[in-house]
Image (cartoon, rainbow, N blue to C red):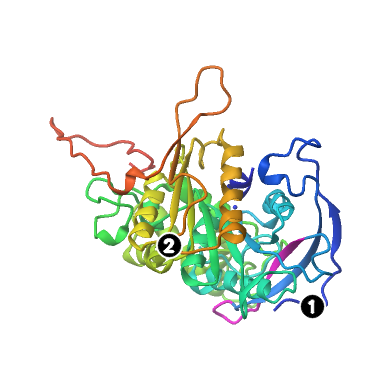
Amino acid sequence: MLVSMLAAALVSLAGPAATAVAAPGRLAAGTAPSYLTAVAAPSYLTAVQRIAVGPEPDGTPVTLDTTIYAPAGAGGSTARHPAVLLAHGLGGSKADLEDAAVLLVGEGFVVLTYSARGFGASSGRVHLDDPAFEVADAQRLVDTLAARPDVQLDGPKDPRVAVVGGSYGGALALMLAATDPRIDADVASITWHDLADALFPQSASASSADSSSGATPGPFKQLWGARFFAGALGGSPSGSPSPGDGASPSTNPSATPAAGAAARAAASGAALCGRYDPTVCRLMVTAMERGTPDQALLDLLRRHSPAPLLGRLTAPTLLVQGQTDTLFGLDQADATARALTAAGTTVAVRWTDGGHDAPSTTADADEQATVDWLRHFLVDSPGRRGAARPGPAFSYTLPLPRGASTTPLATSDRYPGLTASGTTLPISGAGGQVVTPLAASPRR
């Protein structure tokens, strides 16, 4: 399912020849839902390309491993199609996006999937959705789409394009849409608004998911922090340490004991950090050791978040957030929806019964909502601020009925979270020590 698929995440013109592929049989003949009736069993072309993007801070070149899916015949005809850029979750790669790409190319979109820098077969290091690296990389991919003869253009070097992503890719989708005015629509699922607040939640003195409020950071979600590192421990794309990693201690017999100790320390640090940027790694490791972040980490996490950029986002945005999610809760999507509404941007919010902690039972409906959003804003009635939505402003799941396998959905023509006010409840009694705060793993 499209949302579930995504949550799990210089073009060489002389690259390998495109390959014609018959789409797998997702649906029996004659049973395609309304949004797939145009092409029930499509064929498509794929082309694998390595695309050069900006270098690492030390000047090391970086290329991204990409696959472009195009409707059959698109490359050799004058027909142009809107495009979709798909972004995967942390620790994933473009392989996670294949099913979603096949679904969307069947809808008539040109689809570009890629492994973000530091993941899969792409080179480089993980900077954690840094505007100067991962977001800039995505802008380069939009340039790639604009240069294709089968992609519809709204102007010179301006493709008709949407970006869709989940979790790590969801934040990327929001940040790209906010920083590149060529993005015409975006869908962001189970992702963060402010990564500092999401990892160090503080509900006692803050009223929104925004670390800029000045509140004292809350307890670190250390379990999720550990999983962040696990997602980048794959080493270099070839499986061996990258040049400059410092992963191999000196074997020079004439090396001094101090030099050997330094080399072993470097090797230990490289093994822990995997493909993470050293600065990101050092700050996160310090927070995990202490249980609290320093200001440098909070500032970095906030810069690597949609929160400070949303005032510039004009593309219609669909936010899909999980009700079963201890990593990025509903408060994160709520804060994003508030910011976009304040900016006058068309937004819809969809709550599912899944998330990072459990799969959604409404994946089929979530998939259709995503496809409908893309088709509406890229094909049927392209528009930006103030554009009409193709569906309800707010959808949410109800309790699962006994014996049912799919949670019923309720809808509303407005998102009540935008105007709802909180209620303060007094707490009385003697003080005590909190052993296990909700959604956190304190050291003591």
Image location of residue 411, percent across then percent down: 44, 37
- At label 2, counting other C-alpha atoms closer than 10 Å, the crowd grade (few under 14, some 14-19, many 20 or more) is many
Quadrant including the N terminus = top right
Residue nearest the observer in this picture, 149 or 170: 149
Image location of residue 275, percent across then percent down: 59, 63
Q: Quadrant of residue 157?
A: bottom right
Could one spot residue 252 in this view of the protein?
no
Could one spot residue 263 in this view of the protein?
yes
| Label 2: which secondary element | loop
Q: Residue furthest top?
A: 403
The secondary structure that most of the magenta stretch takes on is strand
Q: Quadrant of residue 184?
A: bottom right
| Label 1: which secondary element | loop
Q: Residue at x 77, y 45 (%)?
A: 40
Q: Residue at x 55, y 36 (%)?
A: 360
Residue nearest the observer in this picture, 384 or 306: 384
- At label 1, counting other C-alpha atoms closer than 10 Å, the crowd grade (few under 14, some 14-19, many 20 or more) is few
Q: From which residue to which does the magenta span run?
A: 56-70
Q: Residue at x 61, y 65 (%)?
A: 161
Q: Residue 306 — which label?
A: 2
Image location of residue 98, percent across then percent down: 72, 52
Q: Amino acid at mark 2?
A: Pro
Choose the circle earlier in sequence order: 1 or 2. 1
Quadrant including the C terminus = top left
Q: Amino acid at mark 1?
A: Leu
Residue nearest the observer in this picture, 259 or 105: 105
Q: Is residue 59 magenta?
A: yes
Report, in whole angstroms, how far the alpha carbon at label 1 lies from the one at label 2.
Answer: 34 Å
